[in-house]
Image (tube, rainbow, N blue to C red):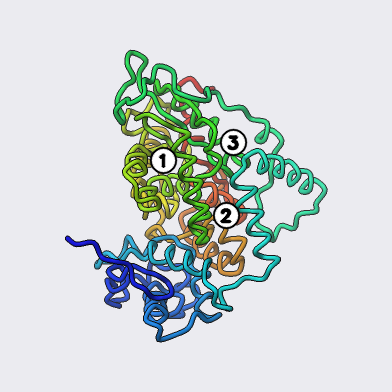
């Protein structure tokens, strides 16, 4: 099949992806912003129509157009629901990338906002030591009550920031370069890299500790990435900062050489790593992406370690990027079913409104989307004493905790249920 050349409109979208939408509307029920607002422009179908108009020069890049694109939470629920196979997520990423480089007045952010974005995306997320140092300052500010709750930031803990990861940095023990994906490394058992990332490693490191405990119990020899794995670039891609995302992707790939599996316990990071092939369009990136596994996905592949029945009830909440992008949400259930009584939501995986930085950039919409998720959780008893909400993404955990729920990562739940854990 011949390669389709990108369109030459102002958004530079792939014409084949752009015309795939037939306007059937089956995506509407799966779009959180449409369900909250009821506006056509807040739906995937409406946004695609607006993209077409701009791409065909029938409409300008206006403030209304930019606002409609910014209001998308990028949950990719419409991708999974579309019978025509529309890759709306790709269209939105490409549109935002075009807007970042556009000279249109409506797409040009104020100077102070550009400076803030530059500092956040380039300096903080791209340099882990800076992020950790700022996290300590944030913790102090929270203790002094200088940080308003409306900012939506998690309450940081000293114990979490001081947590140490029980794994060496560099090549996993016993792993010769070129070990086939998913295969044992010589006589030492399974070997793997463990990607820690940026925000999750700084703010939710106990989840990493729990994941490493489970992997050790499963007989996996794990190593942490070498220098360069500060950030996967997911937030940069969502924001349209594609060149910065590509730079980070190259660094991440170089930090975990060889052929061993790469385990990721953040759904958003895992989705980003699995899409490096599209981001970089190189054979090396595609090979790297094929090695990436979500934590639960990998544990189920190699065999869940022995666990005890806890007698506790867990409500499973699927992060959008685990369910819609990675399509790896079912292993969470397989992994936990021997230890917990699992309850399912009836909202068909509707987004919780976290969306990476979305909750800070679009607080009103994010809050309304979260309220719908909270209603679904309340309906199934997630607010009852002893009931835990299970979510495999840091953004979702923060978002739902702010709504008053007790939220744990699947790795934390499994680590608690390991047979050697105290009863």
Reply above or below: 276 against 226.
below
Query: Quick check: can you spot residue 177?
Result: yes
Query: Which comes sooner in the sequence, label 1 or label 3?
Result: 3
* CB contact under 8 Å: marks 1 and 3: no
The extreme top residue here reads 187
Determine the secondary structure under disc 2. Answer: helix
Image quadrant where one finds the N terminus? bottom left
Q: Residue at x 37, y 38 (%)?
A: 293
Residue on which disc 2 sits: 399
What is the CA distance from the residue labelled 2 to the residue labelled 1? 23 Å
* CB contact under 8 Å: marks 3 and 2: no
Expressed as whole percent of the image width and height from the top left, the position of residue 382 reads 51, 51
Density class for disc 1 (Cα within 10 Å; few <14, some 14-19, many ≥20) is some
**Mark carried by residue 341:** 1
Asked whether, in this view, residue 363 is left or right of residue 257, the answer is right
Density class for disc 3 (Cα within 10 Å; few <14, some 14-19, many ≥20) is many
**Mark carried by residue 205:** 3
Determine the secondary structure under disc 1. Answer: strand
Q: Nearer the viewer, residue 319 or 317?
A: 319
Determine the secondary structure under disc 3. Answer: helix
Of tags 3 and 2, the one toward the viewer is: 3
Reply above or below: 39 against 146.
below
Q: Nearer the viewer, residue 223 or 366?
A: 223
- In which quadrant of the rendered view does residue 364 lie? bottom right
What is the CA distance from the residue labelled 3 to the residue labelled 2? 17 Å
Asked whether, in this view, residue 257 is left or right of residue 148, the answer is left
Q: Residue at x 75, y 58 (%)?
A: 148
* CB contact under 8 Å: marks 2 and 1: no
């Amino acid at each position: 099949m011949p390669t389709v050349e990108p369109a030459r409109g102002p958004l530079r979208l792939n014409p084949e992806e752009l015309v795939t939408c037939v306007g059937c509307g089956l995506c509407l029920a799966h779009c959180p912003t449409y369900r909250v607002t009821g506006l056509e422009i807040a739906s995937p179908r409406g946004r695609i129509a607006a993209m077409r108009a701009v791409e065909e020069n029938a409409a300008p890049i206006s403030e209304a157009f930019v606002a409609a694109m910014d209001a998308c939470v990028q949950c990719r629920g419409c991708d999974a629901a579309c019978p025509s196979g529309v890759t709306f997520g790709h269209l939105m990423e490409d549109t935002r990338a075009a807007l970042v480089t556009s000279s249109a007045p409506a797409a040009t952010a104020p100077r102070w906002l550009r400076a803030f974005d530059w500092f956040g995306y380039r300096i903080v997320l791209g340099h882990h030591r800076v992020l950790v140092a700022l996290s300590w300052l944030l913790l102090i500010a929270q203790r002094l009550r200088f940080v308003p709750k409306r900012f939506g930031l998690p309450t940081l803990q000293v114990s979490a920031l001081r947590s140490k990861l029980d794994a060496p940095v560099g090549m996993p023990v016993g792993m010769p370069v070129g070990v086939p994906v998913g295969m044992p490394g010589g006589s030492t058992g399974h070997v793997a890299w463990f990607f820690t990332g940026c925000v999750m490693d700084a703010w939710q490191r106990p989840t990493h500790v729990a994941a490493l405990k489970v992997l050790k119990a499963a007989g996996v020899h794990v190593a942490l990435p070498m220098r360069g794995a500060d950030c996967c670039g997911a937030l940069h891609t969502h924001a349209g900062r594609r060149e910065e995302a590509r730079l980070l992707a190259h660094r991440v790939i170089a930090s975990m050489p060889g052929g061993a599996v790469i385990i990721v316990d953040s759904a958003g990071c895992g989705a980003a790593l699995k899409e490096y092939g599209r981001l970089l369009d190189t054979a090396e990136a595609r090979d790297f992406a094929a090695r990436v596994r979500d934590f639960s996905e990998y544990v189920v592949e190699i065999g869940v370690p022995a666990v005890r029945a806890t007698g506790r009830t867990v409500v499973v909440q699927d992060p959008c990027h685990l369910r819609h992008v990675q399509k790896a949400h079912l292993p969470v259930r397989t992994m936990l079913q021997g230890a917990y009584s699992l309850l399912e939501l009836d909202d068909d995986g509707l987004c919780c409104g976290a969306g990476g930085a979305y909750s800070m950039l679009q607080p009103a919409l994010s809050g309304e989307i979260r309220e719908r998720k909270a209603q679904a959780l309340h309906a199934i008893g997630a607010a009852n004493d002893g009931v835990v909400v299970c979510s495999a993404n840091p953004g979702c955990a923060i978002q739902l905790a702010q709504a008053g729920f007790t939220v744990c990562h699947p790795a934390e739940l499994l680590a608690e249920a390991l047979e050697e854990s105290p009863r």
